[in-house]
Image (tube, rainbow, N blue to C red):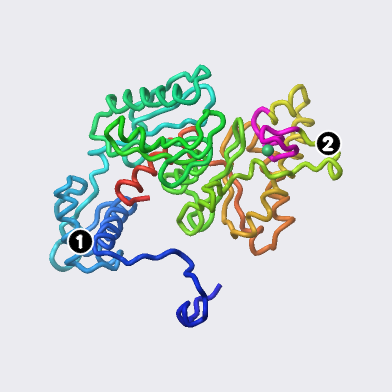
Amino acid sequence: MTATTRPPAAARGVGRALRPTGKVLPEHARAHNRSLVLAHLFHIGPASRADIARSTGLTRVTVSGLVADLIAEALVEELGVRVDGKVGKPATMVGMRTEAFQIVAVDLTDDSRLLGAVLTLVGDVVVRRSEAIEGRTGESAVELLETLCRDLLEAATRPVIGVGIASPGVIDLAGNVVQAPNRGWYDMPLAAHLTERLGVPVHVANDANTRALGEFTYGSAAGSGCMVITVGQGVGAGIVVDGALVRGRHHAAGEIGHVTVVDGDLRDEPPLDCACGRAGCLETVLSVPALRRRTAGLTPEESDAALASVGRLLGIALAPVVSALDLAEVLLSGPPELLDGPLRDAALTTVRARTMPVIGDGLAMRMGSLDEDGALAGAAVLVLSGQLGVS
Ligand SMILES: [Zn+2]
């Protein structure tokens, strides 16, 4: 699309703006500018105040004021004078104190245990803990989660800026679990409840979305457009476009697991019943249990062919998504012995065969780079962005 100068919306008779916009209050502008400075230091590393002003477009005076505040909050420190041989007055460098704080992250993806960790601000795991779920759901699962969070908060070796939780299910922006059937949670204000109980800010988001955030922030996923497909007990996906997570009207963007891909009259295999009440969903062929069933007892050649047939179905489901969003990358997250081979090859070939060359030819499809820690890293990003405006 090309950018053109257009008359204001009202002059064109358009009754609504593209996004809801409110009055920009000075404190909002200040918070925004503060995140610009922190994000620069987080992503680029130590810099002079002049460097920050240049790259953020803020004035030197504004940057100096913000840096002074951040130093007072102990988030930023002065690192001495840059020695780079340049002519002129040497610049004092400032850097974010990424080692001075930690984040607690919990991944609720696994049906058998809660996985938690204390991470540094740059995503390195310091301490790990887990709790066996043993069939607990509802309130009892929340209590177990609270216990794990307390253990991790005690195990942290630096002040903790917040707790990030990656949960299956549909979760709104405020961290309310709209529905997570496997945990027995419906309209559960999980973030607010745990924030009150633990006394630190708690952020909750869908586990596939947090994986996408993790791959974007700590992995090397393309911020211009990437989709992370999580393959486990179920199938989900998180999508980042233009550097932001795609959420959707019902906070359910990326839920491709229940798109029908096997139609009884079109395929040579009968559609299998799905947990959602319908049949032939992507999840019924692509989940880890479904892939293991499909390949059980087969010779290596037969197994490769069986995985490729699922890859084709995945490609059919992905082609319209990749085209509609003009994605640069699709990342697969799950067991590599099932996904990283004939399945991935067939999916990519199928997407390319079904999309315009300008989109499909350059598309990359690869395994996620963060593996099992992807959801934890993404849960940490929730805290970074929620508390510091950095992501
Ligand atoms: Zn389904």
Element assignment for label 1: helix
What is the number of the mark on residue 188?
A: none
Q: Position of residue 64 (x, y in %)?
A: 16, 61
Please, is residue 32 above or below residue 332 in the view?
below
- Look at the image and give the residue range highlighted in magenta: 273-289
Residue at 53 percent of width and 75 percent of height: 2
Q: Which residue is mark 1?
A: 49
Mark 1 CB near ligand 1 (8 Å cut) = no
The local crowd at label 2, few if under 14, some if 14 to 19, many if 20 or more residues have their Cα within 10 Å, is few
Q: Are marks 2 and 1 in contact (CB under 8 Å)?
A: no
Q: Quadrant of the N terminus?
A: bottom right
Front position in the image: 145 or 290 = 145
221 left or right of 323? left
Q: Position of residue 209 (x, y in %)?
A: 50, 44
Toward the viewer: 196 or 133?
Answer: 196
Q: Nearer the viewer, residue 91 or 129?
A: 129
In this rendering, which labeled residue sits more in front, label 2 or label 1?
2
Could you say where residue 377 lies in the image, as x and y percent from the top left?
42, 39
Q: Compared to 2, does 318 lie above or below? A: above
Residue drawn at x 17%, y 48% is: 77
Residue 281 lies in the magenta stretch = yes
Q: Which mark is residue 269?
A: 2
Percent position of residue 70, x then y = 19, 51
- Circle nearer the N terminus (2, 1): 1
Asked whether residue 349 is drawn in magenta, I would say: no
In this picture, residue 22 sits left or right of residue 156: right
Q: Callout 1, which amino acid?
A: Arg
